[in-house]
Image: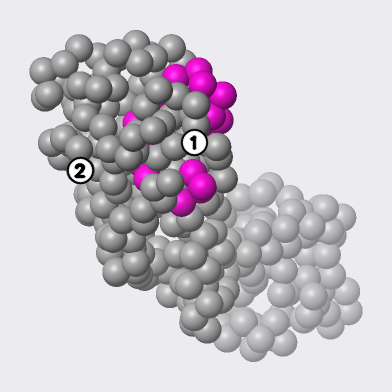
C-alpha cells in the first residue's frame, strides 16, 4: 500500500466513475484500475462493485474509507506543518535562557525581533533554568537555542559570547559592609554567603574567584537557582552574595557594592548544537540575537546605591 493508492481510492470513492476519476487524478483508466486491484489484493477485500455504468463502494470500502481519509488528512497537515517549520517567515522556535536574563534581556530581544513585519508569524516557546539544565536541554534537542553563563567543554556545542556582565556584591542595608561602595574579596570572604546552586553557571565562577585570589571559600549557608531568591534572602540579612549586576536589584532593599579585585569577567553565551538542523526562522533569530545583544548589552548597567 502506498500514498498514491490511497489518493486514487479516496478520489474514486467520491467520483464513482473510473474514467472521470482517472481524469481528475491525471492518470489513465488502466493505471487507476490496476492500482485499485493491487490495493484490494493487499487488503484481501473488494472495495468497489459495479452499479450500472458507475461503481460504488462495497461495505468493506465504506469501512476503509474513513481510515484512508484520516490518513491522507494527517499527512497533508504534516506536510503543511513542515513547510511552515522550514519557512523563514513562519515556524516555531524553542528558546532557553538562564534565570538572570528573564526580566531584562530576553523580553526586549524577542519584542524587537517579532516587531519586524517579516517575523510577526514566528512563535516561541520559552524555557528558563540553570546553565546546566539549559545545556542539557540543548543537547537533548528540547530547545533550539540557549543563553547560558558557562562555556561548557563540549565539542557538540557552539558558544558565541554576546553579553558581558559585571559581578558585584550585595548586602542587607544594615550589614557591616553596607557603609562601603567598594570591597575586596578578602574583605567579604568571612561573611556567610547566599550562593547560586552547583548547577548554575555562576557557582563555578564564584569558586574560581576565591581560588585565584588564594582565599578559602566562604561559608555557603543557602543555595538557590534564582537570582531574585538570592536577593530576597540577602535583603533579610541571611548573608551576602556575589551576583550579576542586574537592573532588577533596584527593587530590593540591598546595597550594591563594587568588587575591586575581580581577576576576570562574567560572560553570557548564545549556544546551539553544531550539527543539528536549524530551520530558516531559527537561523534568522540566531543571527538577529547575536547582533542585537552585542550592540545593546555589552555595556554594564550599574545600579550602585
Residue range of the region highlighted in magenta in the rendering: 231-250
Q: Relative to 229, say whether 8 is above or below.
A: below
Q: Residues within 10 Å of mark 2 (few under 14, many from 20)?
A: few
Does residue 236 appear anywhere in the picture? yes
Residue with the mark numbered 2: 265
The quarter of the displayed image where residue 50 is located: bottom right
Q: Judging from the image, what secondary structure is the residue with disc 1 in?
A: strand
Q: Residue at x 53, y 29 (%)?
A: 235
The color scheme shown is one colour
The quarter of the displayed image where residue 141 is located: top left
Q: Position of residue 248 (x, y in %)?
A: 51, 48
Q: Position of residue 113 (x, y in %)?
A: 46, 72
Looking at marks 2 and 1 on the same chain, the residue that comes earlier in the sequence is marked by 1
Q: Residue at x 15, y 39 (%)?
A: 264
Residue with the mark numbered 1: 254
Q: Position of residue 78 (x, y in %)?
A: 58, 61
Count numbered badges in the picture: 2
In-image side of 175 versus 147 (left or right): right
Numbered label attached to residue 245: none
Q: Relative to 34, say whether 39 is above or below.
A: above
- Viewer-nearest residue: 272 or 184: 184
Does residue 154 appear anywhere in the picture? no
Q: CA distance from mark 2 to mark 1?
A: 22 Å
CB under 8 Å between discs 2 and 1:
no
Q: Judging from the image, what secondary structure is the residue with disc 2 in?
A: loop
Q: Which quarter of the rendered picture does the N terminus lie within?
A: bottom right
Q: Residues within 10 Å of mark 1 (few under 14, many from 20)?
A: many
Residue that protrudes farthest toward the front in the picture: 179
In-image side of 33 versus 296 (left or right): right
**Camera-nearest label, 2 or 1:** 1
Indicate yes or no whether the magenta region holds residue 246. yes
Amino acid at each position: 500500500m502506498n500514498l498514491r493508492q490511497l489518493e486514487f481510492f479516496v478520489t474514486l470513492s467520491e467520483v464513482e466513475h473510473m474514467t472521470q476519476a482517472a481524469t481528475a487524478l491525471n492518470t489513465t483508466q488502466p493505471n487507476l484500475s490496476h492500482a485499485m486491484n493491487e490495493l484490494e489484493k493487499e487488503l484481501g477485500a473488494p472495495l468497489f462493485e459495479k452499479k450500472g455504468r458507475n461503481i460504488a463502494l462495497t461495505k468493506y470500502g465504506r469501512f476503509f474509507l474513513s481510515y484512508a481519509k484520516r490518513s491522507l488528512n494527517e499527512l497533508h497537515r504534516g506536510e503543511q506543518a513542515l513547510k511552515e517549520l522550514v519557512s523563514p517567515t513562519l515556524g516555531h522556535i524553542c528558546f532557553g535562557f538562564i534565570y538572570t536574563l528573564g526580566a531584562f534581556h530576553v523580553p526586549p530581544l524577542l519584542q524587537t525581533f517579532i516587531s519586524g513585519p517579516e517575523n510577526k508569524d514566528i512563535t516561541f516557546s520559552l524555557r528558563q533554568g540553570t546553565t546546566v539544565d539549559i545545556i542539557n536541554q540543548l543537547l537533548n534537542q528540547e530547545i533550539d537555542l540557549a543563553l547560558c553563563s558557562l562555556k561548557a567543554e563540549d565539542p557538540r556545542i557552539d558558544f558565541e559570547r554576546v553579553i558581558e556582565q559585571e559581578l558585584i556584591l550585595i548586602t542587607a542595608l544594615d550589614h557591616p559592609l553596607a557603609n562601603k561602595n567598594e570591597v575586596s574579596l578578602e574583605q567579604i570572604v568571612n561573611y556567610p554567603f547566599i550562593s547560586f546552586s552547583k548547577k548554575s553557571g555562576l557557582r563555578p565562577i564564584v569558586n574560581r574567584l576565591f581560588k585565584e585570589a588564594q582565599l578559602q571559600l566562604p561559608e555557603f549557608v543557602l543555595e538557590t537557582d534564582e537570582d531574585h531568591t538570592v536577593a530576597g534572602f540577602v535583603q533579610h540579612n541571611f548573608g551576602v552574595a556575589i551576583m550579576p549586576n542586574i537592573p532588577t536589584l533596584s527593587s530590593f532593599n540591598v546595597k550594591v557594592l563594587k568588587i575591586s579585585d575581580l581577576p576576570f569577567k562574567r560572560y553570557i553565551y548564545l549556544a546551539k548544537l553544531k550539527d543539528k538542523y536549524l530551520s530558516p526562522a531559527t537561523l534568522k533569530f540566531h543571527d538577529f540575537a547575536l547582533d542585537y545583544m552585542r550592540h545593546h548589552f555589552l555595556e554594564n548597567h550599574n545600579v550602585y546605591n
